[in-house]
Each structure stands twice: as structure tokens, then as C-alpha cells.
Image (cartoon, rainbow, N blue to C red):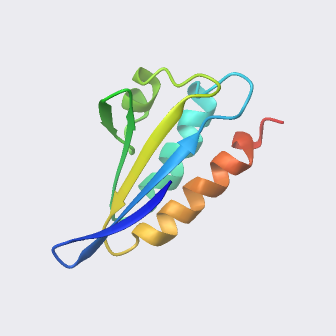
């Protein structure tokens, strides 16, 4: 799923991501995600089963307990949201470089 909307003058990008690595998002993949997210000034959020967390928080990401097959909703808003979203989508496609 892919969506873009306007919030004020900033684009809000929404993507659905599926965790496809064998063990899900544990400490190392969470650290990789947060490292990427923290490079950007836009706001980044992840949501799983109605729980929404700040994508720049490693503890928040771990608390989602996103195992293999989990569907996550990524939301990014701000001037560099498109670049952040693209890099995060690539990380998921690469299965967090675990396979």
C-alpha cells in the first residue's frame, strides 16, 4: 500500500511494509532502522496492530515485537520524507541484510 497526502505544506507518505527476514525485528534490525530514520529531519512513525511508535526510538521499535510476516504501517512527514521512506523501504526489501 502506498499513499501520499498533504498536511499543511508537507507531504505525508504512508507505506505498508512486511517484515520478511527470518527472525523479525530484533535489536540489530531495529538499530539499523533507527540509524536510517535519525538521518532525516522528517517525522517517522511505525504502527503495528494499532500501536504507533516514533521510528527514531529503538525501544519503541522493539516494543512492537514485529516478527516475521508482521505488517507495519510506515508514516513519514516532512521535507525529506520521500528520501527517508525510500531508504527504509530498501532496508525491508534487503531483509535487513540478514539473508
Above/below status of 10 relative to 14: below
- Report the front residue among 4 and 46: 4
- Report the front residue among 28 and 15: 15
Residue 4, position as x, y percentages in the image: 37, 68
Above/below status of 88 relative to 3: above
Q: Residue at x 48, y 38 (%)?
A: 72
Above/below status of 56 relative to 11: above
Q: Is residue 34 left or right of residue 55?
A: right
Residue with the most extreme right position: 99
Residue 90, position as x, y percentages in the image: 66, 56
Q: Residue at x 48, y 44 (%)?
A: 34
The answer to which image quadrant residue 81 occupies is bottom left
Residue with the most extreme left position: 8
Q: Which residue is drawn at 64% across and 46% down?
A: 92
Residue 99, position as x, y percentages in the image: 84, 36
Q: In this view, does 84 lie to the left or right of 7?
A: right
Instruction: Report the label total.
Output: 0
Q: In this view, does 75 lie to the left or right of 67?
A: left
Residue with the most extreme front position: 1
Above/below status of 43 relative to 62: below
Q: Which residue is drawn at 34% across and 65% down?
A: 41
The answer to which image quadrant residue 61 occupies is top left
Amino acid at each position: 500500500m502506498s499513499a501520499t497526502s498533504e498536511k499543511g505544506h508537507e507531504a505525508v507518505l504512508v507505506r505498508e511494509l512486511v517484515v520478511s527476514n527470518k527472525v523479525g525485528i530484533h535489536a540489530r534490525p531495529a538499530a539499523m532502522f533507527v540509524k536510517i530514520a535519525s538521518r532525516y529531519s522528517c517525522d517517522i512513525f511505525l504502527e503495528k496492530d494499532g500501536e504507533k511508535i516514533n521510528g527514531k526510538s529503538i525501544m519503541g521499535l522493539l516494543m512492537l515485537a514485529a516478527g516475521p510476516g508482521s505488517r507495519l504501517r510506515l508514516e513519514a512527514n516532512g521535507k525529506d520524507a520521500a528520501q527517508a521512506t525510500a531508504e527504509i523501504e530498501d532496508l525491508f526489501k534487503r531483509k535487513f541484510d540478514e539473508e
